[in-house]
Amino acid sequence: MALWLADRPLVLASKSTARRALLESAGIPVEVHPVDLDERAVEQGQPASTAAEVALLLAREKARAVARRLPDRLVVGADQVLALGNGRFSKASGRSAAREQLKALRARTHTLHSALAVVRGTEVAFVHGSSADLTMRDFSDEFLEDYLDAAGPAVTTSVGAYQVEGLGIQLFEAIEGAHSTILGLPLLPLLAFLRRERLLAE
């Protein structure tokens, strides 16, 4: 018996390869429809006071944007915000910005706020947010340059200039939180929702 019970794949409003891999590894067929969303404009238009609220807002708006084009499909949007104290980080624009982000995060604990929203047509069917705390080790400046060399352009593809599923794991001394939350898609709550909707086998 198949685990995925729907007749069409789940739509993912994200170009993240990590999010797609999470879903596919859980046996969920995925159809990717990336959305080009001006995240800063969304934040300014609908103020959110905390990093967790910003992640939920952006996840919802991404899903809504794709659902407008595919009103008969179930669309999942996701977003992630990195918070260090009262500050929030966006993706680094280049190697220099990545270096400055990693220097700021070095030897400190930051929080990744991940959120997802499921939209069908105009209805927001499900939202969920979760967080994880990550502590970077006090690595040397020499190691930092070696890491930037080895990671290459990938440092600009994720907030914080790292991917824990790859070379970025070497930056850390402690991680507390679900792996899927760290990768930007809280998976267990999503699976529970899909089972309630009878889209996954129970």
Image: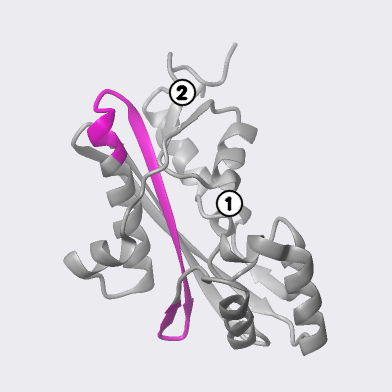
The residue labelled by disc 1 is: 180
The Cα–Cα distance between marks 2 and 1, rounded to whole angstroms, is 20 Å
Q: Which residues are magenta?
A: 66-88
Find out whether the residues at labels 2 and 1 contact each other: C-beta distance under 8 Å: no
Q: Amino acid at mark 1?
A: Ser
Residue 199 in view in this figure: yes
Magenta stretch: residue 81 in it?
Answer: yes
Q: Establish if 56 lies above or below 109.
A: above
Q: Residues within 10 Å of mark 2 (few under 14, many from 20)?
A: some
Q: Position of residue 86 (x, y in %)?
A: 40, 85
Q: Position of residue 73 (x, y in %)?
A: 32, 26
Choose top left, top right, bottom left or bottom right for residue 196. top left
Label 2 sits on a secondary structure element that is loop
The first of marks 2 and 1 along the sequence is 2
Q: Residue at x 46, y 23 (%)?
A: 9
The residue labelled by disc 2 is: 9
Q: Position of residue 8 (x, y in %)?
A: 43, 18
Magenta stretch: residue 99 in it?
Answer: no
Q: Establish if 103 lies above or below 77.
A: below
Q: Amino acid at mark 2?
A: Pro
